[in-house]
Image (spheres, rainbow, N blue to C red):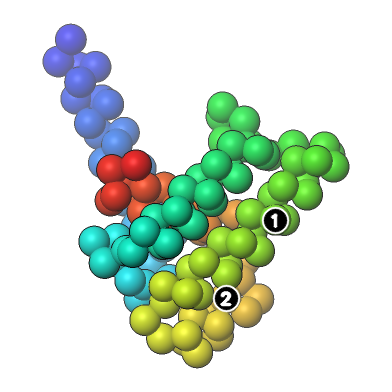
Amino acid sequence: MATTKTSKTAEKHDALLAEQELLSSVPRLKPAAAFRQRDKSNLNKLAVQLMDFVDDEGNVDTTDAAAASALFDFLADADDFFETIAADHDEYIAWSTGLRDSEEIFGALVGKYQRELGE
C-alpha cells in the first residue's frame, strides 16, 4: 500500500513540476485570492468549456468539427480572461501574440486557478 501512495505522490509532484515549467513564461497574473466574483465565474466558465472538447485522457479530437470549434472558442475566451487579470496588459499581449501550445498553457492555467480557488 505504501508504494501506491508514494507513487501517486511522486506522480502528483512530477505533474506540478511539469505544470510549473509549462507556465514559466506566463506574465504575472492576479493571484486567485484577489479574484472578484466576476473573475471566479469567468474562470468556472472556462473550466466548463474544457469539458466540451477534452476527453477523459485529456485529448481533443480535432477531426470533430464541434470539438474543434469548442476548442477555438475556449482559446479566445481564455486569452481574453487572462488578459483581464494580467498585472501588465502590454506584457501579456506581447506574450500572447504568436503563442504556441496555447491549448496546453491555457488548460494548465485554468486547472491551476481552479485548484487555488478550491473549485
Q: CA distance from mark 1 to mark 2?
A: 16 Å
Q: How far from the left and from the top, in percent, is residue 59?
A: 63, 36
Q: Splitting the image into 4 quarters, where does residue 32 fall?
A: bottom left
Kindly indicate whether the residue at mark 2 contacts the one at mark 1 (C-beta within 8 angstroms): no
What's the residue at 22%, 31% (across, down)? 9
Q: Splitting the image into 4 quarters, where does residue 1 fall?
A: top left
Q: Secondary structure at mark 2?
A: helix
Q: Closer to the camera, 29 or 60?
A: 29
Which amino acid lies under the numbered mark 1 shown in the image of this protein? Asp
Quadrant location, the C terminus = top left
What's the residue at 28%, 43% (across, down)? 118
Q: How far from the left and from the top, in percent, is residue 7?
A: 25, 25
Q: Most extreme residue toward the left, as rendered? A: 2
Answer yes or no: is residue 42 visible.
yes
**Residue carrying label 2:** 96
Residue 42 located left or right of residue 68: left
Q: Most extreme residue toward the top, as rendered? A: 1
**Residue carrying label 1:** 73
Q: How far from the left and from the top, in percent, is residue 14?
A: 31, 42
Looking at the image, is mark 1 or mark 2 earlier in the sequence? 1
Q: Secondary structure at mark 1?
A: helix
What's the residue at 36%, 59% (across, down)? 37
